[in-house]
Amino acid sequence: QVQLVESGGGLVQAGGSLRLSCTTSGRTISSFNMGWFRQAPGKEREFVSGISWNGASISYADSAKGRFTISVDSAKNTVYLQMNSLEPDDTAVYYCAARSRSSIVLRDSSPYDYWGQGTQVTVSS
């Protein structure tokens, strides 16, 4: 059974940084393309960043470009999202997700088969 467990959320002031982690169990992370999504209150879930199974393809939402960095540590079966220069608009529940291996990083949430429980990120102004 595949499980994704996120950690690293919290409360931070605008301009600060957080690093989110998501560890897979049940199958090695190299079995998947990984994605980070977020959902703010009253808004739809949106794509933040994604990485292909071999790291060859990486994608960022426009809102994340230049501020967020996605990376994978295969030895730890963990994907990270380093978030710098955080803004109040980044406040949301952040979810990691996994889908079958592909050379393409998809931004639509529906193809992702496995989801973590979410971790809250709150950025104060």
Image (tube, grey):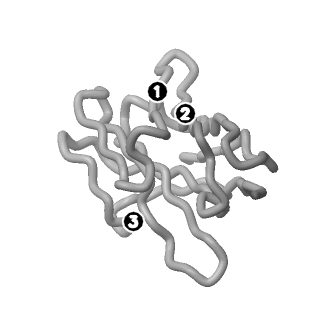
Identify residue type, mark 3.
Answer: Ser
- Name the residue that disc number 2 marks: 80
Number of numbered discs present? 3
Identify residue type, mark 2.
Answer: Tyr
Identify residue type, mark 1.
Answer: Val
Q: Which residue sits furthest right?
A: 11
In terms of sequence position, does the residue under pointer 1 or pointer 3 come before the other? 1
In terms of sequence position, does the residue under pointer 2 or pointer 3 come before the other? 2
Residue shown at 61% from the left, 53% from the top: 116
- Name the residue that disc number 3 marks: 109
Q: Is residue 32 above or below residue 117?
A: above
Residue 91, how many percent across, how many down?
66, 61
Residue 37 seen in render = yes
Residue shown at 67% from the left, 36% from the top: 17
- SS under mark 1: strand
Work out whether residue 56 or residue 17 is closer to the camera in this orientation and state it: 17
Using the numbered discs, state the Cα–Cα distance from disc 1 to disc 3 in whole angstroms: 20 Å
Q: Which of the 4 image quadrants contains residue 112?
A: bottom left
In terms of sequence position, does the residue under pointer 2 or pointer 1 come before the other? 1
Q: Residues within 10 Å of mark 2 (few under 14, many from 20)?
A: many
Whether pointer 2 and pointer 1 mark residues with C-beta atoms closer than 8 Å, the reply is yes
- SS under mark 2: strand
Residue shown at 35% from the left, 38% from the top: 51
Judge depth for marks 2 and 3 and give the one in front.
2
Residue shown at 71% from the left, 54% from the top: 121
Residue 118, how many percent across, how many down?
66, 57
Q: Residues within 10 Å of mark 3 (few under 14, many from 20)?
A: some
- Name the residue that disc number 1 marks: 72
